[in-house]
Image: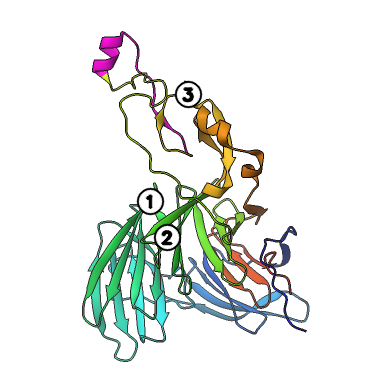
Amino acid sequence: MAAEIHSRPQSSRPVLLNKIEGHSDSVNAAVLIPKEDGVITVSEDRTIRVWLKRDSGQYWPSIYHTVSCDLILCVCVCVCVCAAHQNRVSDLIFSLESQWVISTGHDKSISWMSTQSGSMLGRHSFGSWASCLQYDNDTQHAFVGDYSGQITLLKLEEQTCSVITTLKGHAGSVSALYWDPVQRWLFSGASDHSVIMWDIGGRQGRSLLLQGHHEKVQALWYLPLTHQLLSCSADGGITVWNMETTREEAPQWLDSDSCQKCAQPFFWNIKQMWDSKTLGLRQHHCRKCGKAICGKCSSKRSTYPIMGFEFQVRVCDDCYDTIKEEDRTPLATFHEGKHNIAHMDMDPSRGLMVTCGSDRVVKVTHTFVLVF
C-alpha cells in the first residue's frame, strides 16, 4: 500500500510505546537503530548500551560497555576521547563523504580529523564554549553554535578554514542546531526559549523567530516531506511547527529616548525629564512593529502566529487594533513529553521518535506528525 503523507500537523497525541530505564546518570543521546527494533544510548555514567526489543515487548540491553574516559559525546552513536580537545567534547559529526570526524568542545574550538589517516587536519577557536554542530557535506560548511548565542558559519578545507559569517539573533546560549540541505535552512534553538529559522540559501540570511516554549530548547528535527519542524525543550514540551505557511519576519527593535507613541521620556532621558518636569518611564517594545513604547501605550497582549508568536506578547495599542481574530489562529501544535528532553532522534518511515534527558529516562514514542 502506498504511503499517504499529510502536510498538516495531526491532532492526535503522541503514543508512548516503551520507556527504557536503567541508567545511573543523565542520558546524553538515544538513537533509533535503522530497520531494527532497537535503541543505542550514551550516558553520563560512562556507558554505551544497545537496547533490543524482546518478545515481551520490553527493551533490554544486549550490549553494555563501560568506557574509562570522561568525555562522552552528546549527539553521536559513539563514545571517544578526542585528543584534539582539552575539555569536554560537546558535539561530533562523522561525514562519510569527506571521511572526516568533526567535533566541537568546551575548550572553545572546532576540529576536524581524517578517518583514513587518523591525523588532525585543522582547528579553529571561538570566544565561547562551542555547544552544538551541523555540517553540510556538499559544500563542506560547518555551523557552530556557542554559549554567547552566536552561530558561526565556517568553510572547512583540508588544512585550514575560513569564517564566512556569524549569525546573531538569540539572547541566550545556542543549545541545538538542525540543518536541512535541500531547502538550505538552518534551525537553531537556545536557552532564551526560542527557535530561529535561518534561510541560508536564497534570501540573504532571512530569519524567522518561533516562540512556543517555556524552557530551554534542546532538540530540533525538520521533516521536509510534511514541512514540519519539531522542537523539544527541557520541560518536556514538544512543539510541531507548520513551516509550509508564509510567515513574516519579526521586526528589529528600534532605539529611542522617548516613547514613539506618546513622546514621554524614558528614565535615562535626563534632559527631557528636566525640561518637561516629568518622571521617566520604562522602555518596552511592540513585538509586531518594533517601536520603543511605554507601558501605557502597550497595555494589550496578543498572539501573532504568522510572526512566530504562539504565546501572548506585548503589542502597542495601535498594532493590537490591526490584528484580526483569524490572525491569531495557531500555526503550531503543542504536546507534552512528560520528561526532560535533552536529545531526540526520529525515524519518519516508521513513525517513531526517541527522546532522552537528565531524568535518566528514554522514551520510544509513536509520532503524531506522519500518517501512513
Vertical side of 30 occupied by 106: above or below: above
Provide the secondary structure element on which disc 2 rests: strand
- x and y percent of residue 2 in the render? 74, 82
Indicate yes or no whether the magenta region holds residue 160.
no
Q: CA distance from mark 2 to mark 3?
A: 32 Å
Q: Amino acid at mark 1?
A: Gly
Provide the secondary structure element on which disc 1 rests: loop
- Residue assigned mark 1: 169
Query: Residue 246 lies in what quarter of the image?
Result: bottom right
- Residue assigned mark 2: 198
Q: Residue at x 60, y 82 (%)?
A: 34
Which residue occupies the foreground of this view, 344 or 367?
367
Which residue occupies the foreground of this view, 151 or 270?
270
Q: Residue at x 21, y 77 (%)?
A: 160
Q: Residue at x 25, y 80 (%)?
A: 157
Count the marks.
Answer: 3
Disc with the residue nearer the chain's start (2 vs 3)? 2
Query: Residue 230 lies in what quarter of the image?
Result: bottom right
First to last magenta residue range:
270-287
Disc with the residue nearer the chain's start (2 vs 1)? 1
Mark in front: 1 vs 3 = 3
